Image (cartoon, rainbow, N blue to C red):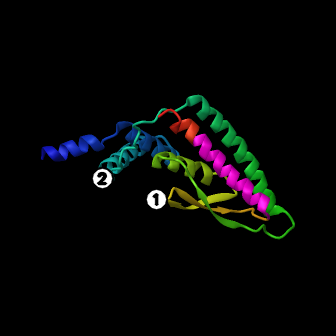
Amino acid sequence: MSQLFTGIKHRFRPWFVAWLTVMWILLMGELSWGNFAAGLGLGLAVVLLLPLPRIPNHGYRIHWGRLVLFIFSWLRDLAVASIKVSWLALRPAEPPRNAILNVPMRLSSEFVLYLATCAYNLQPGGSVTDINLADREWTIHVLDADNERAIEREIANVAKLERQMIEIFESRR
């Protein structure tokens, strides 16, 4: 019986329950006691009945200045990629040729590889379709691969993202 309470103690994360409660209230669109109680109940149920492993955070020393620069750079790239993909969709021409590429990744941490994958997938124009953890390789789909220069540019973009992730998370280990 004490093992049950120990498991619950390790699974209970009050900030996550609070966040889920707020998200439920926002989803319902109205702040009321009923929505608060339902959100709190759902948050507790998710945390206690569907436990997620803790995010590994040992050994990471985040370089905050580079992270802030990365975020601004990523937002700029997001705007440029959105305009580019919009133009590709609306222009009066044939759809561009696309490509599937295998790109090596030198990131040593699976968590940092996950963050890099999220950052890449949120940008329009390409997506990671497979991650080979054993060989540290991404398989990516590139929307605009009309010529060799476009493919090389996308491989350079992935290398730049990889370099930024290493500088932010792995350079001071």
Q: Amino acid at mark 1?
A: Ala
Dot 2, crowdedness within 10 Å: few (<14), some or many (≥20)?
few
The residue carrying mark 2 is 49
Task: Label 1, secondary structure: give it.
Answer: loop
The residue carrying mark 1 is 134
Which of marks 1 and 2 precedes in the sequence? 2
From the viewer's perspective, is residue 87 above or below residue 163?
below
Question: On the image, which quarter does residue 69 sit in?
Answer: top right
Q: Amino acid at mark 2?
A: Leu
Question: On the image, which quarter does residue 153 sit in?
Answer: bottom right
Task: Label 2, secondary structure: give it.
Answer: helix
Residue at figure coordinates x 87%, y 66% from the top left: 92
- Horizontal side of 75 relative to 116 (left or right) equals right
- Comparing marks 2 and 1, which lies closer to the viewer? 1
Residue 170: image location, x then y, percent: 51, 38
Which residue appears farthest toward the right when viewing the image? 92
105 vs 28, nearest the viewer:
105
